[in-house]
Amino acid sequence: RRGRRRSPKPRRSALLTVAAPSLCVLGVTAVATASVTGNDAPGEAGEDIALGGEEIDEEAAEAARAAHAVANKQFDTQLQGLTAAADDYAERASRTQGRIDLAERKAEEKRQAEEEAERKREEAKRLEELRPKFFLPVERRGLSAVYGQSGLNWANLHTGIDFPVRYGTPVRAATDGTIRTQYHVSYGNLMIITAPDGTETWYAHLGSYVYQSGFVQAGTVVAYSGNSGNSMGPHLHFEVRPGGGSAVDPAAWLRSKGLEPS
């Protein structure tokens, strides 16, 4: 039987046997050294990065502060503009309101003035309606001569009525009207008052005039009695001539107005 042939094992060199562990130690040492060195290097870089970060943060903060300052300045400028605009608007609004208030006050004053004027017109109208429109020419009643009477004292029929009053007795307008005066040989100092409807009332033998022209209301003292012209003594001769025409009976005319002369 043939036996196997063993392959001879290679012999290790003593140098390799010794060197291998040494290389391992060296490798471990190198790794350790590298580890230490590696740990130290990143530490320094980290410190640099941290310092750089602080510088970056400071720059960013400064930039932020600058941006905030600009924004605040812009805001202040805008706020000042808005405040000025608001003040201007308020002033204009105040002026506008003042004009509105003034216009309203004037309108109210005008309205009140118109109401007052209307009230006065109504009051004047009421008083005018109540005011007597006809008066006896003198306060004293009683006649010394009547209309149509004849005799030695008149060339023709008597055209009026006579009130026997003393010299200087107040003579009143029998109607509203316009005054004119003249001297007449027979009538003496004569006043004629023409009423709005054209009726004339004549006042003769007057001593003096209070008015010689103008418009008067009924009842106004316009003259004083006397004895002028063709007169036998102080008295008032009174005539009525509708439309300025022929004389009518003054006593009847006065009675038609609610007045009694006798």
Image (tube, rainbow, N blue to C red):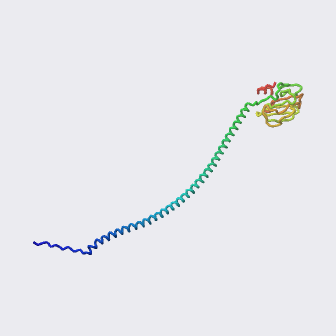
Relative to 126, residue 68 above or below: below
Residue at screen point 47% across, 63% down: 54
Q: Residue 256: percent from the left, percent from the top? A: 76, 26
Foreground pick, 91 / 164: 91
250 relative position to 38: left or right: right
Q: Residue 43: percent from the left, percent from the top? A: 41, 66
Q: In the image as oriented, which residue stretches furthest toward the left?
A: 1
Q: Quadrant of the N terminus?
A: bottom left
Q: Is residue 139 visible?
A: yes
Relative to 258, residue 105 above or below: below
Q: Residue 69: percent from the left, percent from the top? A: 54, 59
Q: In which quarter of the image is the C terminus?
A: top right
Q: Can residue 249 be seen in this view?
A: no
What number of labels is visible? 0
Q: In which quarter of the image is residue 123?
A: top right
Residue at screen point 73% across, 30% down: 130
Q: Quadrant of residue 73?
A: bottom right
160 relative position to 10: left or right: right
Foreground pick, 228 / 140: 140
Foreground pick, 198 / 59: 59
Q: Residue 250: percent from the left, percent from the top? A: 81, 27
Relative to 49, residue 147 above or below: above
142 relative position to 102: left or right: right
Relative to 17, residue 159 above or below: above
